[in-house]
Image (cartoon, coloured by chain):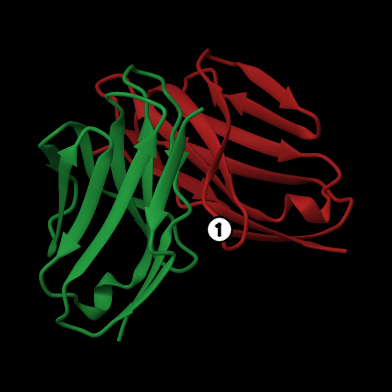
Chain colours: A red, B green
Amino acid sequence: GQQVMQIPQYQHVQEGEDFTTYCNSSTTLSNIQWYKQRPGGHPVFLIQLVKSGEVKKQKRLTFQFGEAKKNSSLHITATQTTDVGTYFCAGRNNAGNMLTFGGGTRLMVKP
Amino acid sequence: SQTIHQWPATLVQPVGSPLSLECTVEGTSNPNLYWYRQAAGRGLQLLFYSVGIGQISSEVPQNLSASRPQDRQFILSSKKLLLSDSGFYLCAWNNRGGNEKLFFGSGTQLSVL
C-alpha cells in the first residue's frame, strides 16, 4: 500500500533559525496536504498542493510539491516559539479518496 | 458554520472494560467520517472511515469497531480494552469529493491500565 515517510522525526532549533521538514511518498500523489498539531491539540489544516512543482507561501511558511508529485517540503523562515508543534504531511493517491499521513515532524523552538 | 464535537476529552479505563467514544458533526450533511489513533509522539493511524449511515470501512484489524447510526454521528467501541488500545483518538470529517481537507475533533486521550 501507499506509504508516506516524513523526516526528520524531531527538530530542535533556536528561535530565529530556519526549519524544513520533508515528505516522500512511495507512489505518485494527486495532491498533498499539510497539517499542524500544537502540543496537546488536534491537527489543523494548513494548505493543499495539487500541481506538479507548485509552491505556496503563508507568511513565513513555504510549501513545495515536487515535479514528480512524490515529495513535498515545508520550510519555515525565522522560526518563532509559536511555530512549536508537530507538522504532518498527508498524501492522496490517484486511485482513491483516502489520505495517508506521514509520521510527522515535531518542531521545538528554544527562545 | 460546521463544528465537530468529540467526547470525553480524557478517559481512564481498566483492561477488559468496554469503550464507547462518540463524535458528532454539526452544520453539514453527508460528511465522510473518520476515526484516527495517535500513539504518544507518533503519527496518525486511520482506524475506520464511513461514507454514509451504516457504511463502515476498517483499515486495521483489531478489537475496536465503529458504527454510524445517524448521518452526523460516529461511534468508536470496544467490548474489551487492551493495554495497547491506549492512545489519543481523533474523530475527523470532510466533505464528499476528491480533494477535501479534514477537520479534526479535539480528541480523546484514552489510558488503559
* Residue lying at 43% horizontally and 57% vertically, measured from the top left: B107
Percent x, y of residue A43 = 52, 47
Please give the name of the residue rendered at 50% of the width and 39% of the height, measured from the top-left corner: A89
Q: Judging from the image, what secondary structure is the residue with disc 1 in?
A: loop
Residue at the spot of label 1: A9
In front of the other: B76 or A46: B76
Instruction: Report crowding for label 1: few under 14, some 14 to 19, many 20 or more residues within 10 A (C-alpha).
Output: some
Amino acid type, label 1:
Gln
Q: In this view, does B56 lie to the left or right of B26?
A: left
Q: Which residue is drawn at 46% across and 28% down?
A: B101
Q: Position of residue B108 (x, y in %)?
A: 40, 62
Residue name at image x 22 percent, y 56 percent: B76
Quarter-wise, where is residue A110 in the image?
Answer: bottom right
Nearer-the-camera pick, B19 or A66: B19
Using the image as rendered, state which of residue A23 and residue B43 is in the foreground: B43
What percent of the width, then of the height, locates residue A97?
29, 25
> Of B2 and A105, which appears nearest the observer?
B2
Q: Is residue A85 left or right of residue A90?
A: right
- Give the quadrant of the N terminus of chain A: top left
Quadrant housing residue B82: bottom left
Q: In this view, does B99 lie to the left or right of B15?
A: right
Q: In which quarter of the image is the C terminus of chain A?
A: bottom right
Residue B95 at x, y percent in the picture: 36, 23
